């Protein structure tokens, strides 16, 4: 089983001015591709284990990954899954607010969408070092905001990610330099809530 990056639904330049063309291009074709190549290399010789398994299933059941490659699967596999989600929820024509069931759940738990965005932004800005801020569906089936370090996926903690902000420096440094907070503030302009809703409804119906 070979794992791959998901096709981009937009051109590198389409996220301007919020994320610059060069950053999207390098991030997708170099950083993400690097994780894809390393993951497939790590899994060479483990074809019986990977057969029929999605990467997400593998990470969710991380305790079943052979011990000798588990850490590599967490790092490289996380690098692939996390970036695939990140790039898939961005759009040049985003739906600006959630609706339906997701919107109801957000209002119930956070009061309103702005409070939730503040919570996710705070996690992103305060994440020490490299990592991600997330909106997840936790084990109880409820929404939760968390952050993770390095390439740890929420899946390895039995949580289903539906939205993420990559706060590794490679995601923003060319344009924003050390000003991570400005990148985080701007990313909401291109964050497509229709994708997040799709993810939410899929995870809730499992
Ligand atoms: Fe990244």
Image: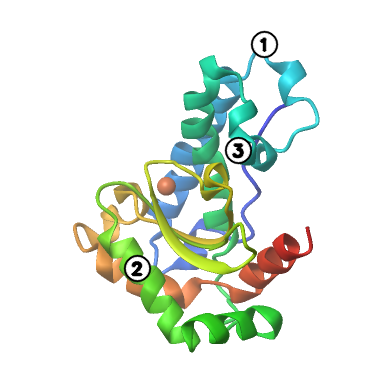
List the single residue furthest toward the left: 178
> The residue tagged with tag 2: helix, strand or loop?
helix
Task: Label 3, secondary structure: give it.
Answer: helix
Determine whether 203 is above or below 196 in the image: above
Residue 23: image tag: none
Kindly report the distance in space between the C-alpha atoms of the residues bearing marks 3 and 2: 26 Å
Residue nearest the observer in this picture, 47 or 179: 47
Residue with the mark numbered 2? 184
Q: Is residue 34 visible?
A: no
User: Would residue 161 be visible to someone looking at this image?
Assistant: yes
Where residue 122 appears, as percent x and y from the top left, is 31, 69
Can you tell me whether the CB of the residue at mark 3 lies under 8 Å from the nearest atom of ligand 1? Answer: no
Image x and y of residue 162, in percent: 59, 62
Query: Is 159 left or right of 2, judged from the image as shown?
Result: left
Up-down: is 2 above or below 200? above
Mark sitting earlier along the chain (1/2):
1
Image mark for residue 45: 1
* Crowd class of label 1 (few under 14; some 14 to 19; many from 20; radius 10 Å): few
Of circles 1 and 2, the one toward us is 1
Q: Is residue 10 left or right of residue 150?
A: right
User: Front-most of 161 and 157?
Assistant: 157
Residue 39: quarter of image = top right
Residue at position x 43%, y 85% in the image: 114
- Cα–Cα span, label 1 and label 3: 18 Å
The residue depicted at 69 percent of the width and 40 percent of the height is 57
Instruction: Name the residue that disc number 3 marks.
Output: 59
Which label lies toward us, 3 or 2? 3
């Amino acid at each position: 089983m070979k794992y791959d990056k998901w096709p981009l639904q937009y051109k590198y330049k389409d996220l301007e001015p919020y994320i610059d063309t060069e950053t999207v291009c390098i991030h997708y074709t170099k950083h993400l591709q690097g994780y894809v190549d390393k993951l497939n290399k790590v899994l060479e010789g483990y074809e019986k284990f990977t057969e029929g398994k999605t990467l997400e299933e593998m990470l969710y059941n991380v305790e079943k990954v052979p011990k000798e490659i588990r850490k590599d699967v967490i790092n490289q596999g996380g690098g692939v899954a996390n970036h695939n989600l990140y790039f898939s929820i961005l759009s040049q024509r985003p739906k600006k607010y959630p609706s339906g069931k997701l919107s109801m759940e957000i209002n119930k738990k956070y009061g309103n969408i702005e409070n939730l965005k503040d919570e996710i932004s705070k996690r992103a800005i305060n994440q020490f070092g490299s990592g991600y801020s997330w909106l997840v569906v936790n084990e109880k089936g409820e929404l939760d905001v968390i952050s993770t370090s390095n390439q740890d996926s929420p899946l390895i903690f039995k949580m289903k990610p539906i939205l993420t902000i990559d706060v590794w420096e490679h995601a923003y440094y060319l344009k924003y330099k050390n000003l991570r907070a400005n990148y985080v503030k701007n990313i909401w302009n291109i964050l497509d809530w229709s994708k997040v809703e799709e993810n939410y409804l899929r995870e809730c119906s499992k």
